[in-house]
Image (tube, grey):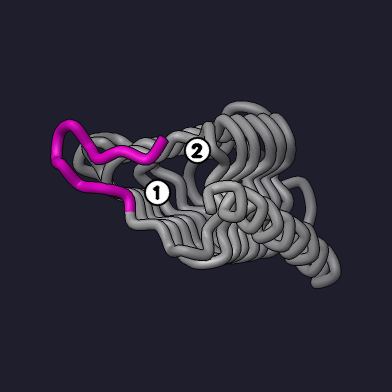
Amino acid sequence: MIVKSPFTGKEPKIHPSVFVAPNATIIGDVEIDEGTNVWFNAVIRAEAGTIKIGKNCSIQENVVIHTEPGSRLIIGDDVLMGHCAMVHGPGSIGNNVMIGISATVLQNHEIEDNIIVAAGAVARGKLETMGLYAGNVLGERVKELKKRDARKIGAGIQFYVGNGKQFKKMFDEKEE
């Protein structure tokens, strides 16, 4: 379901190459760039704020993305959000970032490039580049990432970008 905001009347702007699962929900002032995919039961709500999602991102099943009224949430390119992740704005997420399965990113975050937020972690505040963050409450940097770790994030994202293209093609063909 893709609907305009009942508060502002703004409608989502979704690049034609984006795969949006039939039961995903996108509401309001949301912009999604090319190559991204939004999987089944994901919810992206910007009924009173703004959400911008970059290129080649994977918003997997049951992810919830929301931002507070009057605020912005900016998500960079090549971001993978694992199943059941929760991301709440305002805040910013850089490029080549993985938000793990069931991780929670709380408002007022600044996540730099090349970051992994581990499955189940709770993150808030500034997360500095090339780090793996895990743990409860605010997330704790547990190790320095190597370049090969950052490449693994990219490989996972590219798999889902391709997968999203296949699903988009399949659903587009059904509509014809």
Q: Main secondary structure of the magenta part?
A: loop
Q: Amino acid at mark 2?
A: Val
Q: Is residue 69 left or right of residue 2?
A: left
Query: Height in image: 77 above or below 5?
Result: below
Residue 149 visible from this viewpoint: yes
Residue in view at x 63 percent, y 37 percent: 139
Residue in view at x 40 percent, y 48 percent: 91
Q: Is residue 146 left or right of residue 17?
A: right
| Depth check, front residue: 52 or 149 | 52
How far is the residue under mark 2 from the one under mark 1? 9 Å
| Depth check, front residue: 115 or 34 | 34
User: Residue under circle 2?
Assistant: 87
Q: Say which quadrant the N terminus sits in.
A: top left
Query: Crowding at label 2, few (<14), some or many (≥20) Cα neighbours within 10 Å?
Result: many
Query: Height in image: 21 above or below 55?
Result: above
Q: Is residue 144 left or right of residue 28?
A: right
Residue 145 visible from this viewpoint: no
Quarter holding residue 162: bottom right
Residue 142, horizontal then vertical, whole percent = 76, 46
User: Residue under circle 1?
Assistant: 91
Range drawn in magenta: 1-12
Task: Name, please, the residue furthest toward the bottom.
Answer: 147
Residue in view at x 48 percent, y 44 percent: 125
Residue 134, horizontal then vertical, whole percent = 72, 39
Quarter holding residue 39: top right
Q: Is residue 120 left or right of residue 34?
A: right
Task: Name, please, the residue furthest toward the right.
Answer: 148
Q: Amino acid at mark 1?
A: Gly
